[in-house]
Amino acid sequence: MAIFKNRKYLFSKGIDQYFTGVQSAYSFTALFFKEAFKRPFHFREVVNQSFEVGIKSLPLITLTGFIVGVVFTKQSRPSLEDFGAASWLPSLIGIAIVRALGPLVTALICAGKVGSGIGAELGSMKVTEQIDAMEVSAINPFKYLVVTRVLATTITIPILSLYCSFVGLYGSYVNVRSEEAISLIAFYQSAFASISFLDIFTSVSKALIYGFTIGIVGAYKGFNASQGTRGVGKAANQAVVLSMFLIFLEELVIVQIANWIRYF
């Protein structure tokens, strides 16, 4: 009986903690939208954070996008050749990379690199009481630390996503060029022939949502870190895991919505 009561208590406590966490995350997100449109606007800090997110992620995005293009092309060619449709390879790669792989690969890389960085940085500031010191100095730490970082990821990740898509297509072109004679312009024309405005709009929209998710999750976990230096590592780890989980959920929902629009 005592064991049953203990399990019931732990289950009830877990449910309470879950809904408390959901309510806290909702309040945190609502506060972001409230503060984002209020003065002062820290444009310089947004630019600095965009540099941290964008420029410093370019080498990894470039390498990953290029490899994705090469590997996906290598894997797709034999199947198309079996059906005598090898000429459709550029169109297939264009659709796959622009619609899905470009935004998703970029988001996952940034979730690991940027999300963990935001969580660790803000978590470190939280446990060392630097955030409390900013409040004493009459600086709004939420606006300066959270809003600027979330805006930076929301703005920068769509740009990185488009860049990753073009690099991935170039990697595909390199592989196609090694097998047959085709110019770069002809390859890109063939790749974009099957891509509609809805595909590009959906891709950019997904990247915007992914960027916001990475920024807000990393900031939330870091801003609410506790337990000293151990909490900093925990915040960084949770920021990556939760960001990736939400990105996959958002991918599923957005793809479904895009398909409904496409077919209707």
Image (spheres, helix red, strand yellow):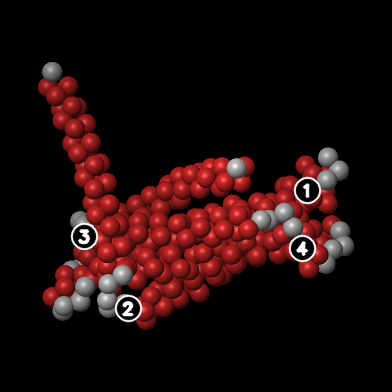
Q: Earlier in the sequence, mark 4 or mark 2?
A: 2
Q: Nearer the viewer, residue 148 or 229?
A: 148
Provide the residue designation for mark 4: 189
Q: Earlier in the sequence, mark 1 or mark 2?
A: 2
Q: Are marks 3 and 1 in contact (CB under 8 Å)?
A: no
Q: Earlier in the sequence, mark 4 or mark 1?
A: 1
Query: Which of the image's four quarters has the C terminus?
Result: top right
Provide the residue designation for mark 3: 228
Q: Are marks 4 and 2 in contact (CB under 8 Å)?
A: no
Q: Are marks 4 and 1 in contact (CB under 8 Å)?
A: no
Which mark identifies residue 42? 2
Label 3 – label 1 distance at C-alpha? 52 Å
Q: Residues within 10 Å of mark 4 (few under 14, many from 20)?
A: some
Q: Amino acid at mark 2?
A: His
Describe the element under mark 1 as helix, strand or loop: helix
Which mark identifies residue 77? 1
Which mark identifies residue 247? none
Q: Residues within 10 Å of mark 3 (few under 14, many from 20)?
A: few
Say which quarter of the image contains residue 124. Answer: bottom left
Q: Which residue is most to the bottom? A: 44
